[in-house]
Amino acid sequence: MEKLRIDKWLWAARFYKTRSLAVEEIDKGRVRVNGLEAKPAREVKVGDTVALRQGPVTRTLVVLGISNQRGAAPVAQQLYEETPESISLKLAAAEHRRLNSDPASSLEHGRPTKRDRRDIDKAKNGASGKEWNSRWSASSD
């Protein structure tokens, strides 16, 4: 076997869990072969360069083998070699994620619960219970 569709190769190399996910990512323009935007039926051969974007990281790979069967992870890793620049970018992105926390993680709690809301209202209006009488009413008293 000399050539294989890029969607099958990405699936066999275990970059995507299903071929349909691989096709979806290719259609979104996140996969390039030899510097050109790929289509799912684009054939790859040994020696081609594949660039794919996974989240914020762009991985650049050199195709070392062709397989149309999805095998174990150690076997799939023999189908490609990641370039040194790609490895350094991946490590830099991992370091950046480690040093800069996610903004959502700084939130200790989500919305206040019903009990929290009552406590907030008591703190604002005092414990005398005047908050009910101080509300606006449409009655004609």
Image: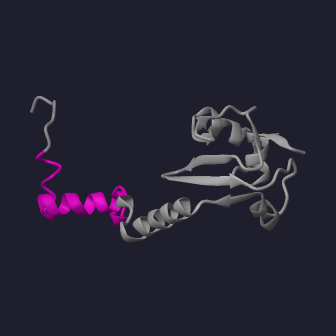
Q: Residue 2: x percent and y percent?
A: 86, 44
Q: Residue at x 12, y 58 (%)?
A: 125
Q: Residue 21: x percent and y percent?
A: 69, 42
Decide: is 41 above or below 119: above
54 or 45, which is in the foreground?
Answer: 45
Residue range of the region highlighted in magenta in the rendering: 105-134
Q: What residue occupies the far right of the structure in this picture?
A: 1
Q: Name the side, left or right, on which 102 lies relative to 37.
A: left
Decide: is 8 above or below 92: above
Q: Residue 31: x percent and y percent?
A: 61, 41
Query: Colour scheme in the image?
Result: one colour
Q: Residue at x 86, y 47 (%)?
A: 68
Q: Residue 12: x percent and y percent?
A: 80, 51
Locate residue 45: give its quadrant.
top right
**Residue 4 painted magenta:** no
Decide: is 54 above or below 22: below
**Residue 120 painted magenta:** yes
Q: What residue occupies the far front of the structure in this picture?
A: 47
- Give the mark count: 0
Q: Name the side, left or right, on which 8 lies relative to 38.
A: right
133 or 6, which is in the foreground?
Answer: 6
Q: Residue at x 75, y 31 (%)?
A: 41
Give the position of the C terminus as an image quadrant.
Answer: top left
Give the position of the N terminus as an image quadrant.
Answer: top right
Q: Residue at x 73, y 47 (%)?
A: 10
